[in-house]
Amino acid sequence: MSLSAVTPHRARLGEGPFWDAPSQALYWVDIAARQALRLMGGQLRVWQLPEHVSAFIPCESGDALVTLSSGVYRLDLNTEALTLLCVADPQPGNRGNEARCDAQGRLWLGTMQNNIGAHGEDLPITRRSGGLFRIDADATVTPLLSGLGIPNTLLWSDDGGHVHFGDSLDGTLYRHAIQPDGQLDAARTWFAAHERGGPDGSAMDSEGHIWNARWDGSCLLRLTPEGQVDRIVELPVSRPTSCVFGGPDLTTLYITSAASPLDHPLDGAVLSLQLEVPGKPCHRFAG
């Protein structure tokens, strides 16, 4: 397997990779540096934002969503103007973390106690104040879960009947059944603690296997639909944070990462990895 950095850019806390098939563009964020980034046609563009940003997702309407500390905003990609869409989580001191859209184009946003200082420094997590929220195209907000620590990983089954969702504070990936009214059944442990780091973001391939980034584990775990380790992919970064399938045939796995005390040369880079099995596509926000 050949791994390479897609740009010279190094993030403090790279996260939230999104592959937009219509434009063949890769979107991601640097949470700590308050940057939204896009690589399209070999050109890197960076939007500097006023708050910590955890996701950067294009919309069907032509602009993009950014999940900032104070709410979910539309970002005009040309003028850089921000317009508030909604405040999903009203809890003071929380920020967005994991965010992805389901097949209906609804944004699912996991929030947590803010753990990043004004200058990008780490702050302690002292409470489980996070939640999981669904935001429809008309900006309607539906609370789904509460009492979360560090939400990570959002992946849905093909039939839309289940969602895989993780809490890094628990070191666990869960599986929830989705009820007909859209609410979630109680969590079932799907993959518990593993010696290779803690669970961060994930991507799903066409065979239903989940590729999970392992914070402080320097690897990805490929997990079977039954929650067993199928493969360990070693990485030249200390803290991989998430991954997404992209490229013309969805066989390129893009992996975001963060800086670390080990200060490896590629820490904070976005890596690309060519695979034989394609992945599932990302979905734009429907609004």
Image: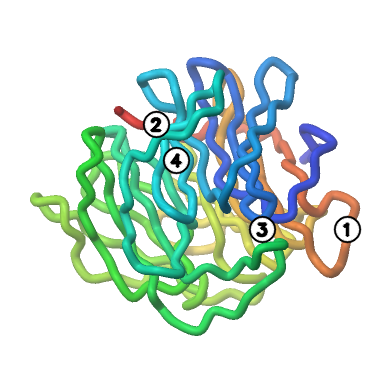
Distance from Cα at disc 2 to Cα at disc 1: 33 Å
Identify residue type, mark 4.
Answer: Glu
Q: Indicate which disc, 2 or 3, sits on the residue closer to the N terminus.
A: 3
Q: Which mark is residue 264?
A: 1
Residues at discs 2 and 1 in contact (Cβ within 8 Å): no
At label 3, counting other C-alpha atoms closer than 10 Å, the crowd grade (few under 14, some 14-19, many 20 or more) is some
Give the labeled residue for mark 4: 207
Q: Residues within 10 Å of mark 4 (few under 14, many from 20)?
A: few
With respect to residue 58, does 86 lie above or below? below
Query: What residue is rendered at 60% in x and 49% in y?
Result: 15
Q: Residue at x 50, y 21 (%)?
A: 21
Question: Where, quadrant-wise, is the N terminus in this rendering?
Answer: top right
Q: Which mark is residue 283?
A: 2
Q: Classify mark 1: residues with Cα within 10 Å, few (<14), some (14-19) or many (20+).
A: few
Q: Secondary structure at mark 1?
A: loop
Say whether disc 3 or disc 1 marks the residue closer to the N-terminus. Answer: 3
Question: Which residue occupies the foreground of this view, 152 or 48?
Answer: 48
Instruction: Tell me if I can see residue 226 in this picture.
Output: no
Q: Quadrant of residue 38?
A: top right
